[in-house]
Structures are given as structure tokens and as C-alpha cells.
Amino acid sequence: MTERSQIKEKIRRRVMVVDDEMINRQLLGYIVSRDYDVIYAENGVEALSKVKNEKEMISLILLDLIMPGMDGYEFLSVIQSDPELRRIPVIVLTSEKNAEVKCLRLGAVDFIPKPYDMPDVILARVGRSIELSEGSKIINDTENDIISGLYTRQYFYRYCERHDKYFPGIPMDAVALNINRFHFLNEIYGRSYGDKVLGMIGHEIRRLLKNKSGMACRSDADSFYIYIEHQDDYDGIIDELAGRIWDSAGNDHINLRMGIYSFADTELNIEERFDRAFHACNPIKSIQKAGYKNHLAYYDDSMHEKELFSEKLLSEMDNAIRERQFKVHYQPKYNIKGDRPVLKSAEALIRWQHPEFGFISPGVFIPLFEENGLIHKLDKYVWREAAHQIREWKDSFDITLPVSVNVSRVDLFDPDLGDELLNIAGESDIDPSECFLEITESAYTDNSSQMISTVQSLREKGFHIEMDDFGSGYSSLNMLASMPIDALKLDMVFVQNICEDKKMPAW
Amino acid sequence: MLTVDDLKKFGANTEEGIGRCMGDEGFYMMLVSSFLGDTRLDQLEKALKDNDLDKAFEAAHALKGMASNLSLDPITGPVTEMTEMLRSRTMTDYSVLIKDAKDKMEVLRTMADQ
């Protein structure tokens, strides 16, 4: 397939023929009309007004040089100085060899000599020029992020690498920048406002880089990466950046977070360097203190070690399950209504007895597994262990002691969850009512109607549902009325000071 | 009514001209007819009389473009010569070349009238 027919296959593009000579205009238009829609202009002024009206529609301009009024040279320099029109390729029609250099300097992409070449030659040149310009426009569009005006991430990385190659001696910092609770900003003020703020940040980053060696991209959403020659004072930089953005946005609720990997090691690939900056940026959320609006943190090796430790735990989980390194402990629950406490049920608690690190707290590995989508596997392991235990107590002591197990938020998204739980109960020949499913309060608040119906169906299958950690989130007491639950477990914060604070009402 | 044979006899490279019109003979003949109605040659003559070399160049350049695109070689010849001299704004006697072009034009117009 020829290039031309490839172009033809897509859409019929529009070409403008600008020539004051009727015969030349008609002849060229006739040739070009075989493959394109043609519009005509008799002089530069007419051409310019048509181009401005249809700038998105015109794929190429065929331009005569010598015309009365505005001639071809003037027309070329006008459209080259307009950033929106500049993208339209112009082929100059000329019989003069010595005009070619001048036209090239003015931005023409090609020449068609007069008298015209044979139609196939002309069509091939037109097709080729359109193809090239559209190709470079695609590159241009993907190279720059429209919202921020900065590079897109992939191009940014390549430009960073090129920078390293050309300026190997300059110490560089990798900086990650984002907005604290950006999604909030989007929700409150609307998406277009959010985009505007991102545009302002892009603008201010460009200003910051003006007199410095460096470059920047918007990595995704509200996350920006800056590769910049080493700076000593990021406190000053972030304050100035934020100050300008508050001024232009008229809103000082926009809080910036910055993570800095100083003197970034060029032995690491560029993606890893920015991963480090990003990691440094993110923990700020958890240590945010009142009174400080903007935050910055430096990457250090302890972070790296923590990361490595996490990586190791993640990679070892499968094996740990196989080798039964996870131990399930059972905390008894008593009914204290009567004269003396009566053992009624138990709660399954998990511990990791690691062969190398020893005891690892669930506070360390559970959030880690949740973040990385591995928690379902672990939950399932616990469900099965607990079911076996219930069966064993039945067989050994002839008692029925239900066990509470955790059902994580992500488990609830699994459409097969109910069947999976029934299977596990079936394997140990126990009744679903002996399985107490603990679902944390926060799971309901995310997407409450879907969650409620999922939980409802579990309950209909006979499982006993407990809401865990009630009071830690935002659910209100009147929400409880609509919840399909059998038991409510109060969060620790409700009761931990119960005996110390005399002002608390007696329960 | 002008025919392709007439143009051949006149010395036009009709094959080339029609080829440029993507083989469309009717379209080619239409363009030739409209060329015959063009007044540039008179404008060129007048501009030369007025010593307006800029205007003369514009007219000659336009004529050259049209004639060469239509492959009307007998007219392209003198018109091209004038265009090149006028490009450097050479002040000289153009009357022989003008006459040559006008005569050729007249031949065509006469053919067309028959």
C-alpha cells in the first residue's frame, strides 16, 4: 500500500490552494482534489482569514509566492508567528531556485516547482508532508502534558537521561511534588478548578526552572516530578511556590508536599530515582502537624531499608503461608451478663513467626498486604484455619465455639466471596452461623449501598456479621439502623480512657 | 472551437498539459480557453510602456506560470525570457518579445474562433 492511499484510507483531509492566478489555482486544485477536499484563496489576506476560521480543519497549504497584496513571504511569516497556525505545513509553489532557502527559513516544508510536476508527484509530496506534520504533532502532543504544559512522564525520563549524558558532572536532585488531598480540591471546587490549579503549578515550576539546570513533568493526577541541579534550600522553594499558587488561585487551602532525593545516584535508573523521591513525599500525609501548611521530606537510607524490608515481606508471603509461618491465636470472648463469665466465642488473631526476623506485628504486615492486594490470600488462610479449629474443638471437647475472623474491604468486592466462605465452612463441616465475619466500619463508608447489599447477602447465607471498629470512622448512629449486622464492636478510642476521665458519662 | 489537434499544430506539448490535468482533456481545454481570455499580456505591455517594472514582472511571472502549466510552449518561450529579465528589473527593449507573444496568442485566438 502506498503512503498516499494509507492517508486516503483514514479521512479526507482538507488542503488550501493559495494562488492569484485562476488557471494555476484551478489546475492545482483539480489535481489535489483527487485525494483531498480543496478550498481556494486568491491572495494572502483571503487565505489568512480562511485559515483562521478553519485552522483545525486545514491539513496543508499550497502557497504561491508572488501575489498582489499580501504575498507568499508575508503570509508565511504571519502564520509562523502564530502558535496555533504554525502546525499547518506549507508547500511553496515556485519557479525560482533562489527563493527556496528564504522559504525554508520562513517555515515552508517543501516546494512544488512551476510548471507543476506530474499529478502523482504533487500528490505524493502533499501526502508526505501531511504525514510528517501529523506525526510530529502526535509526538508533540504526547511529549507535553496539556494541563500543566510540562513534559509527560515517559518523555521526561528520556530527557533526564539525555541530561545526565551531556552534563555528567552536575549533581542533581530528584524531587516529587504533589498536592495534599487534591481529590478533595477537585470535589469541592470542581474538576476544571483542579485542572486550573495543576496548570498554575506547571507554570510556577517552569518559572522555578528558568534560571536553573533542570526539567519537569506531570507524572499523573496531581503528581509532579522535577529533575533539578542540587539545591540547598527547598524550604524557601516550596514556600515561594506555594505562595505564588495561593495568590493566583486565591485559595490558601492548597497545601504542597515535596519529597526530595538529594544528590540522586546516577547509577540507579531514572525511574528508581524518582521512586525514591516519591516515597519520601508520601509519608508526609501521616506526620502532618497542625500549623504547617506545606511539607517536605528528604529521602534517606533508612527509608530505603524500610522499603527493602517491605519488599522482602511481600515476596515471602506465599512461602510463609505454605510453611505455616502465620500463627492464628484465639482470644476468648465471655458473656458477662450472668453471675460468672461464660466462654461464648473467640476472635482469631494472626501473628507472623518469621524464621529470620522473629515475631512480626500484624500492624506491620497487614497494612502492607492491604496496599499490595495480597490481603485476600491471608484472610482466606485465616478463615480456613479458624474453620479447622472450630471443628477440632467440636471433636475434642464437644463444644461449639464460634470464631470471629476478618473480612477485609477488598474481599467484599469479590463476587464469589459468599460461595468461597460456604465452601470453607463445608470443608470443616461447620455451620455458617459459627463463623463470625468482622467487617470494619470504614468498609461501609466507601461505597455504602453496594457494601450493604454484599453484607446482606452474606447474612442471608447464615453468617453472623459484626461491625468492627465502630466509632473510628464517620458513620453515624442513625446509619446503624440500616445496617445488616448482628453485633457491633466499639473502637478502642471509645473505651480506652473510660476509667480515667471522670467527665465521661457512666456506661 | 479549439481542438487538441489545433494545439498540437500550434506547437503545444498537449500530452504533458493533459497529463498535468490527470488525463482530463475537457478540463485541459477549458483551462486553455480561459487563458485565451486573460488580459495579462496587455497589462504587461502597458506596464512596460509606463516603466512600471514591478507590475511588469508580476504580469510576466503570472503569464509564465499559466503558459508553462498548460504547456503552451510557443508562448512560454518569450514570456519566460521576459520574466527572467524583469526579475532583475532590467530596463531594456521588450518590444520584440512582446510582439512574439502577442502574435502566438493571436494565432490561438484565431484558431479558436473558427
Image (cartoon, coloured by chain):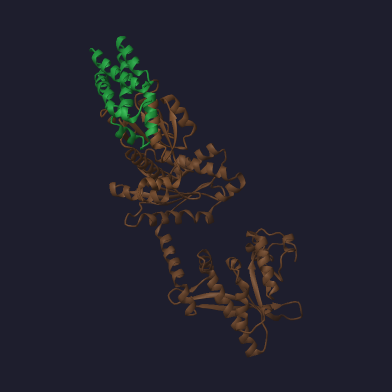
Chain colours: A brown, B green
Residue A461 appears at what percent x and percent y? 68, 75
Residue at point 32% right, 48% down? A162
Tally the marks.
Answer: 0
Toward the viewer: A146 or A493? A146
A378 relative position to A151: left or right: right
Up-down relation of residue A66 to residue A397 (above or below): above
Toward the viewer: A445 or B58? B58
Residue at point 31% right, 28% down? B7
Q: Quadrant of the C terminus of chain A?
A: bottom right
Which quadrant of the figure has residue A229?
Answer: top left
Up-down relation of residue A433 to residue A507 (above or below): below
Which quadrant of the figure has residue A503?
Answer: bottom right
Toward the viewer: A205 or B98? B98
Furthest residue in direction right, as rendered: A338
Q: Is residue A199 visible?
A: yes
Residue A354 appears at what percent x and percent y? 46, 75
Residue A169 appears at what percent x and percent y? 28, 48
A313 relative position to A158: left or right: right
A217 relative position to A378: left or right: left
